[in-house]
Amino acid sequence: MFIGFDASRAFSRDRTGTENYSYQLLKVLAKIDPVNKYIVYTRVSQKEKFPDNFIFKQINWPGFWTQGGLAIQTFMDKLDVLFVPAHTLPVIRKPGLKTFITVHDLGSEYLSSMHQLKQRLYLGFMQKIQLKTASKIIAVSYATKEDLVKRIGLEVKKIEVVYEGYDKQLFKPVRNDVLINSLRLYGLSPNTYFLFVGTVQPRKNLERLIIAFSRQLSAFRLVIVGQKGWMSDEIYALPKKLGIEAKIKFLGYVPERNLPTLYSGAIALLFPSLFEGFGLPILEAQACGCPVLTSNASSMPEVAGKGATYINPYNIDDIVKGMERVKRKGERVKMVKAGFENIKRFSWEKCATETLKVLQNS
């Protein structure tokens, strides 16, 4: 079978979210599948070594890469299947071509005011038209599957749930002098800060989190890791308004290889997002022995399992109470133990194996 793989995001320089999903899935498929032939479509050239059954094609297309360059390629190449690991299929494609797409969340549907207009329009069209024409949908959680059925009107049997994974070689506890010395690079020391990881944008609920943090009478700091996102100016301005500017540290984008240190040294990961299709930082934190506080909404309880403290993300007082709980040593020990148990359910190997099964059997 000839499988077309949209790797337009996989080899981005600063991978997060869907880019990391695409990259990890491609790497593991190369390890587990020596039989099928893959034509991997990229925007940029890549120099990593892959098996001979993986053929890379760089598509140079100035704009609307998917709807132009990739669409044309479906007519030119002999494909049995086209797999798009991040949201958008070519509207015009070779007739009869089986198409598979991964949906990571429906945030633009549920929280439309927190997304850019062009994103709302483009993803809105994709969700209501393209998803209905795909051969099969892969949802990264049962919460996302339920959203697809309720909000888009897709048939249950058209959707397969395949959980994301995490990098087991990278995300593990960092301890002792290695931890202390590594944290110094960021002006931090162990157990003196709470941590948030994710794009700085309204849907991550950072304004309520910062307000809740301001009510904590403690010497701790709040470290916020992530790229600047849409509608984030008020978030960056809020610490100064509240008079806690010295206690909030925005680190911006942090290379993935440095994240285990930040997780390992934190009191807890604070992840009170309003909406998530999966919530990968939860798994990364648990794998590093970091307690987790997260929302009791969307996919987060499904992903975090028993290894987290849950709060109502719309209730600032509840967030404050949750932060008080995760500071207690007894609670932290229980959460860390439950977190290590929870992450056994997830791996990129399992994700790739189940994804391949969907591509082959549909």
Image (cartoon, grey):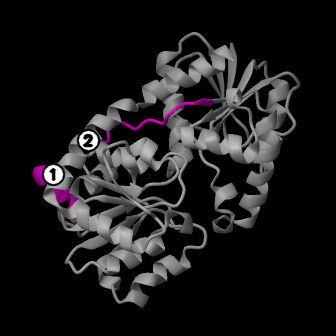
**Residue sitting at 77 percent across and 51 percent down?**
62
Highlighted range, magenta: 160-183
Crowd band around label 1 with a 10 angstrom C-alpha radius: few (<14), some (14–19), many (20+): few
**Residue sitting at 30 percent across and 83 percent down?**
246
Residue 221 or 41: which is nearer the viewer?
221
Q: In this picture, is 25 found above or below 38? A: below
- Sequence-first tag of 2 and 1: 1
Q: Quadrant of residue 263?
A: bottom left
Which residue corresponds to mark 1?
A: 178
Q: Is residue 218 visible?
A: yes
Indicate yes or no whether the magenta region holds residue 315.
no
Q: Is residue 103 visible?
A: no
Indicate the amino acid at tag 1. Answer: Val
Closer to us: mark 2 or mark 1?
A: 2
Residue 290: x %, y % from top left: 26, 51
Where disc 1 sits, the SS reads helix
Residue 297: x %, y % from top left: 49, 54
Q: Quadrant of residue 242?
A: bottom left
Q: In this picture, is 133 found above or below 79? A: below
Q: In this picture, is 209 found above or below 150? A: below
Crowd band around label 2 with a 10 angstrom C-alpha radius: few (<14), some (14–19), many (20+): some
